[in-house]
């Protein structure tokens, strides 16, 4: 299958009713990669291919889909739409790669940021957190956390992500853009050992919006 058919999304259809169905048959002996969608635009968004559609909201964690398994090496294509604006997306994933496709406003139209990650940090006794910068105006994102406000991430460029392992504790974090605090501190609650989390920076009317999600796969 060469086109981004999103065939099994019709069984899940929306972020409010997930189903654990694969997007692609990976086949025996083939490495899976994973793709998710992030709505960093100013209104609700949809990802469409034929009759298949994924709806993305415009409020915090309903902006983000699950990671869907895809076949590494295949060209994946889809159309994203926000309001009356549309944009085409094409991406090829490497084996084991996690890709976030962020939909952003660009002038009077749309653009996408392809954020690639090849995680190697799994530890069943610790939590894994990342900082994903999906704001074109934030050229260097950072994250401070913990009681002493220690630096967790620095200089995360637009369209990139950094990840690290941390102790499974209650954690509150403060994001920065271009060395200035952005938004209010984000309470991530009690982190769970063996789980993956993403702190995400996206554009907003005033400056930036920051929120977190627990990464999950379909």
Image (cartoon, rainbow, N blue to C red):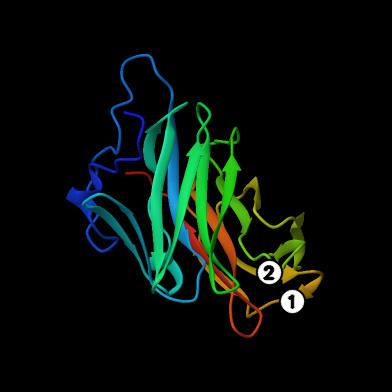
The quadrant where residue 120 appears:
top right
Quadrant holding the N terminus: top left
Q: In terms of image quadrants, where is residue 53?
A: bottom left
Residue nearest the viewer, comparing 46 with 149 = 46
Marks 2 & 1, CB-CB < 8 Å contact? yes
Mark 2, secondary structure of its residue: strand
As helix, strand or loop, the secondary structure at mark 1 comes to strand
Task: Tell me the residue that label 2 is attached to.
Answer: 175
Check the image and name the residue furthest to the right: 179
Residue 30, compared with residue 122, is above or below; it is above
Q: Which residue is drawn at 60% across and 73% down?
A: 107
Q: Where residue 4 sits: x, y (%)? A: 35, 40
- Quarter of the picture containing the C terminus is top left
Residue 89 % position (x, y): 47, 49
Q: Can residue 194 be seen in this view?
A: no
Q: Which mark is residue 181?
A: 1
Query: Which image quadrant for residue 122?
Result: top right
Visible residue check, residue 10: yes
> Badge 1 local density, few (<14 within 10 Å), some, or many (20+)?
some
- Horizontally, residue 43 falls left or right of residue 169, namely left
């Amino acid at each position: 299958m060469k086109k981004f058919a999103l065939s099994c999304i019709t069984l899940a259809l929306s972020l409010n009713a997930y189903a654990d169905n694969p997007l692609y048959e990976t086949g025996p002996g083939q490495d899976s990669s994973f793709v998710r969608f992030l709505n960093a635009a100013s209104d609700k968004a949809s990802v469409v291919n034929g009759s298949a559609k994924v709806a993305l909201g415009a409020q915090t964690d309903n902006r983000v889909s699950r990671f869907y398994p895809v076949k590494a090496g295949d060209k994946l294509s889809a159309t994203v739409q926000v309001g009356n604006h549309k944009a085409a997306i094409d991406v090829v994933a490497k084996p084991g790669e996690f890709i976030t496709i962020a939909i952003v406003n660009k002038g009077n139209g749309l653009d996408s940021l392809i954020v690639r990650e090849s995680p190697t940090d799994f530890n069943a006794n610790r939590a894994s957190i990342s900082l994903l910068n999906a704001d074109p105006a934030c050229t260097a994102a950072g994250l401070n956390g913990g009681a002493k406000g220690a630096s967790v991430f620095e200089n995360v460029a637009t369209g990139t992500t950094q990840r690290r392992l941390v102790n499974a504790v209650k954690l509150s974090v403060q994001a920065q853009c271009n060395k200035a605090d952005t938004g209010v501190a984000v309470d991530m609650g009690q982190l769970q050992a063996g789980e993956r989390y993403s702190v995400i920076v996206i554009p907003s009317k005033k400056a930036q919006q920051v929120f977190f999600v627990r990464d999950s796969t379909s």
